[in-house]
Amino acid sequence: MKSVIIALVMTLAFTAQVQAYGTKEMKKVAPTAPVVTLDIVDTAVGAGQFKTLAAALTAADLVTTLKGAGPFTVFAPTDDAFKKLPKGTLEKLLKPENKATLAKILTYHVVGAEIMAKDVKAGPAKSVAGSDLNITTVGGVKINGTSAVTKTDIKATNGVIHIIDTVVLPPDVKL
C-alpha cells in the first residue's frame, strides 16, 4: 500500500511539472495572425456596412476588377457615406446610362498598391481613375479634406480596405 501511495504522489508531481512547463512554453508562442481568405469585394460584402458600395460596384461592372490580383487599397465609403450625397444622386448614378461616371467615381477610391495605415503619408496618391487623391494626416487621415478615414487595415487577399465616412469625387466630376 505504501508503494502505491508513493507511486501516486510521484505521478501527480510529474504531471504538475509537465503542465507547468507546458503553460510556460505556450505563453512563449506568439499568436498567429488570422488567415485572410477573402478578396476586397467579398471582404466588403461580408462586413455588412457596404451594401451600397457593393451595388454600385455591380452597376459599374467593377466587381471582377476588384476581385482581381491587385494589390489594391480601397478607401471604402460606408452606406452612411453614400447617404450624404445630394438627394437622388445615387439613384441617378446607378442608372445604366451613367455607368462611366459611376465607374470613374468608384475607381477614384482605389489606389493600385497596398498601403497599410502605418505607410500612409500626406500628399498625393494616384487613384486608379487617374486623378490624385489628396491625403492629409494632421488630426487624423483625411481624403481630399472632406472624408475621414474611420477604420484602417482591413486585410483582403488582394489588398486592404480603409473605411471612409464620405464619398470623394474626382475633380472633373460634378454632381
Image (spheres, rainbow, N blue to C red):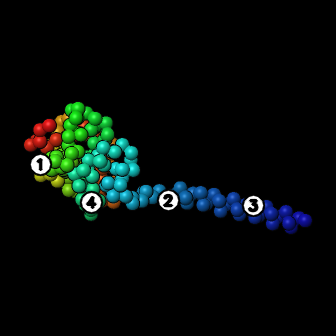
Disc 1 designates what residue? 131
Q: Which part of the image, by quadrant, shows the C terminus? A: top left
Total tally of numbered discs in the picture: 4
Q: Earlier in the sequence, mark 4 or mark 2?
A: 2
Q: Do the residues labelled 1 and 2 touch (CB within 8 Å)?
A: no
**Where's residue 36, x and y in %?**
39, 58
Q: Earlier in the sequence, mark 1 or mark 2?
A: 2
**Label ID, residue 12:** 3
Residue occupying image coordinates x 32% and y 54%? 41
Element under disc 2: loop
**Where's residue 137, x and y in %?**
22, 39
Q: Nearer the viewer, residue 38 or 100?
A: 100
**Label ID, residue 64:** 4
Element under disc 1: loop
Q: Nearer the viewer, mark 1 or mark 2?
A: 1
Disc 2 designates what residue? 29
Q: In which quarter of the image is residue 5?
A: bottom right
Residue occupying image coordinates x 20% and y 43%? 93
Q: Nearer the viewer, mark 3 or mark 1?
A: 1
Element under disc 4: helix
Taking the view exactly as shown, the residue that stands out farthest to the left is 172
The reply to whether residue 149 is in sight is: no
Mark 2 → mark 3, Cα distance in angstroms = 26 Å
Amino acid type of the residue tagged 4 in the rendering: Thr
Q: Alpha-carbon neighbours of circle 4 within 10 Å: few (<14), some, or many (≥20)?
A: few
Residue occupying image coordinates x 39% and y 50%? 46
Q: Earlier in the sequence, mark 2 or mark 3?
A: 3
Element under disc 3: helix
Q: Do the residues labelled 3 and 1 touch (CB within 8 Å)?
A: no
Residue occupying image coordinates x 63% and y 57%? 20
Q: Earlier in the sequence, mark 3 or mark 4?
A: 3
